[in-house]
Image (cartoon, helix red, strand yellow):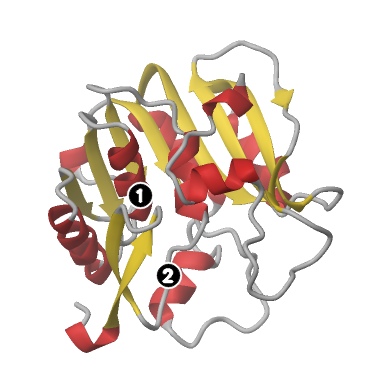
Amino acid sequence: MFAESELSDDKFLCGRLRLLQPVKGYRAATDPVLLAAACPATAGQSVLDLGCGAGAASLCLGHRVPGLILTGLELQPGYADLARRNAARNGIALEVVEGDLAQIPAALRRDFDHVIANPPYYPPGGTPSPVQARATAMQVDDTPLSLWVEAAARRLRPGGWLTMISGADTLPDLLSALGPKLGSAAVLPLAPRAGKPALRILLHARKGGRARFRLLAPFVIHQGAAHDGDRESYTPDANAVLRDGADLLAWFR
C-alpha cells in the first residue's frame, strides 16, 4: 500500500472529482477521462473496468452517469486500495476486485453490459520506468492486448459494448483480436492537433455485432499548431470533455 506521504490529491473534471494518486508511479491523465467519456453506458447498467488503477475512468464515468453498477479489476493491491478510497471520498459506489485478467477472479465471472479498458500499450524495449508500478501499468509485457480483448469478450453479455483507449499503432492488433465474438467496431482517432497524426485511438466494439467497421473523423485535442506556453490550448470540444465531463457519444454516431 502507498504511504500518505507518497500520495498527491489531484483534481479531475475541474475539481468535480478529487483522486489520490502516487507521486511516483502511474498517474492518470487524459486517457481515462476520454475513455469514460466514450462509454455508452446508461443508468442501471453494469460496467467492468479492466485494470482500473486508482479508479479514474470508473469514477469519471460514475460522475457523468449516476446509477451505474461499477466494478473494477486491478492487479496491483496498492492501486486497488486507492480506487476504493477514491470511490468513497467522491461518494460513488465502486466494487474493486484484486486479480489478474488472465485468470479472472471467480467474483467477476458474471456478465456485464459494458467493459472499459485503458491497457498498457507502450511496446517492450527502451528504458522502463524505474518505478515498477508505473512500468506495469504502462508497458506491454506478459499481458498482450489480445488478452485484454479476450477477457472483455468473456465478461460481456450478448450485445454488450467494449470501449478501449490505446495507442494508434496498436490498432491492427486490436482489430485482429476482436475475432468472431466482437464486431460493429468503430474507431475514433485522437489527434493532438489539427493536421497531426493520431497518437491514440478510442475503440467501440459490440459482442455479437455484425455492422461494418467504421473509421471516424478525428477528435482534435489541442488548438493551434504548437504548444503556446501556459495558455489554455484545448479545443472547445476537448475542453467540454476533459474539464466539464461531457461525453463523446456523438462522435461515434
In which image quadrant can residue 39 be found?
top left
Judge from the rendering whether residue 117 lies leftward or rightward of residue 232; answer left or right: left
Q: Amino acid at mark 2?
A: Arg
- Residue drawn at (20%, 29%), measured in percent from left and top? 67
Give the residue number, with chain letter if any, for mark 2: 27
In the rendered image, residue 187, in percent from the top left (x then y), is placed at: 66, 33
Cα separation between marks 1 and 2? 21 Å
Residue furthest to the right: 195
Q: Amino acid at mark 1?
A: Leu
In which image quadrant can residue 51 be found?
bottom left
In the rendered image, residue 189, in percent from the top left (x then y), is placed at: 70, 41
Residue 146 in sight from this viewpoint: no
Q: Is residue 88 above or below residue 58?
A: below
Q: Is residue 206 above or below residue 57?
A: above
- Residue drawn at (36%, 82%), measured in percent from left and top? 23
- Residue drawn at (48%, 75%), measured in percent from left and top? 135
User: Which mark is in front, 1 or 2?
Assistant: 2
Quadrant where the image shows the C terminus: top right
In the rendered image, residue 138, in percent from the top left (x then y), is placed at: 51, 66
Give the residue number, with chain letter if any, for mark 1: 101
Judge from the rendering whether residue 131 lies leftward or rightward of residue 18; answer left or right: right
Few, some or many residues within 10 Å of mark 1 (<14, 14–19, 20+): some
Judge from the rendering whether residue 172 lies leftward or rightward of residue 106; answer left or right: right
Nearest to N terminus: mark 1 or mark 2 = 2
